[in-house]
Amino acid sequence: MSDLIIPLIAVLFVVALVAGLVIGTRRRPSAPAQRPARGARVTRPQSPPVVTESPREQAAAPAEARPSLRDRLGKSRRFFGDRLAETLGGGLDEDTWDDIEAVLIQADIGVATARRITEDLRARARERRLGDAAEIRALLADELVSLFDATHDRALAFGPEPPTVWLVVGVNGTGKTTTIGKLTSDLAHRGRTVALAAGDTFRAAADEQLGIWAERSGATLIKHQPGADPGAVAFDAYAHAKARGIDVLLVDTAGRLHTKTPLMDELGKVRRVIERQGQVHEALLVIDATAGQNGLVQAREFADSVGVTGVALTKLDGTAKGGIALAIETTLGIPIKIIGVGEGIDDLEPFDPKTFVDALLS
């Protein structure tokens, strides 16, 4: 038995020795890094540069060219173009001038204005001995432009200090709230802060529609309960805009009332409430171009009661009777300041008579 113990102990000793060598090898620490000499410059590994991209640039799609005013006035342009081409195609005679007058009347320029344009056109054509269709068309363009008052300031007015107040009026269905939304978007893109007063408290969901535009453009919406006093809404909205230094306050108003109070009296009250605290810089009347001569009746009523300073002529892309623009100015003497030529947020244009006429007759 003692003969077996000595060899067994020797084997166990060898196994333990080998195991210790293996474990020591695995746990051996790496050689310590050499410390740099005193005063030596240490170079650290550089991380790869981080490349960032602006979310706006990353998400931006290739910009599409906006349709020209000529294209967006296609219905009116084709109306003028087709009828004038047909009228002038057979040469000039007395019937031709009658036909030109009829075209102008059909375009909603108005009977008296159409007659005056035709008489002036005929006199100038005879004086210059013009007979070519292109020459008559160019002469007509000059005549139409000349009837717009060149002294009108067509820029929207801003006050010297905030808030600038724009009162927006018009009957329901003319595109009043949509026009406010487009103006709000344009102002926001120009870096101006905007507040919206939901003064049309009598139309169902009017404040909800205005709220959508406010959310899209980052504007502040001030509203009361349905059926509330519009003057109270205007008062609170002005106080809010004044206290917070908001650049522009746009006041929506009722286009129809469900009470016995006359609409014009209510609108006049809204204006007076604002003017007790500050100033109304613009009273914009929104007119639907497709309403034709009926729009003139509306314009007269609003102009007398609210002190309209300018017209926003909407839905010009949807009518063949673009002559209503000239009828508004020659009849009422109120400048058209902006025109709506589409349903998009950017389809609101400053009005320039020459650009407008050129687009109609090109």
Image (cartoon, rainbow, N blue to C red):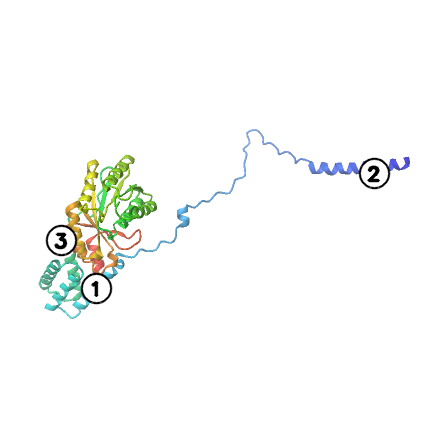
Disc 2 vs disc 1: Cβ atoms closer than 8 Å?
no
Quarter of the image containing the N terminus?
Answer: top right
Tag 3: amino acid: Thr
Quarter of the image containing the C terminus?
Answer: bottom left
In the picture, the disc for residue 331 is 3
- Nearest the camera: 165 or 61? 165
Horizontally, residue 61 falls left or right of residue 237, namely right
- Between the residue at mark 1 and the residue at mark 3, the CA separation in whole angstroms equals 25 Å
Tell me if mark 3 has few (under 14), some (14-19) or many (20+) residues whose alpha carbon lies within 10 angstroms of its own.
Answer: some
**Relative to 315, is 231 above or below?**
above
Horizontally, residue 274 falls left or right of residue 19, namely left
Q: Quadrant of residue 22?
A: top right
Disc 3 vs disc 2: Cβ atoms closer than 8 Å?
no
Give the labeled residue for mark 2: 11
Query: Which mark sits nearer the N-terminus, 1 or 3?
Result: 1
Q: Residue furthest front?
A: 260
Q: Secondary structure at mark 2?
A: helix
Q: Secondary structure at mark 3?
A: helix
- Between the residue at mark 2 and the residue at mark 1, the CA separation in whole angstroms equals 115 Å
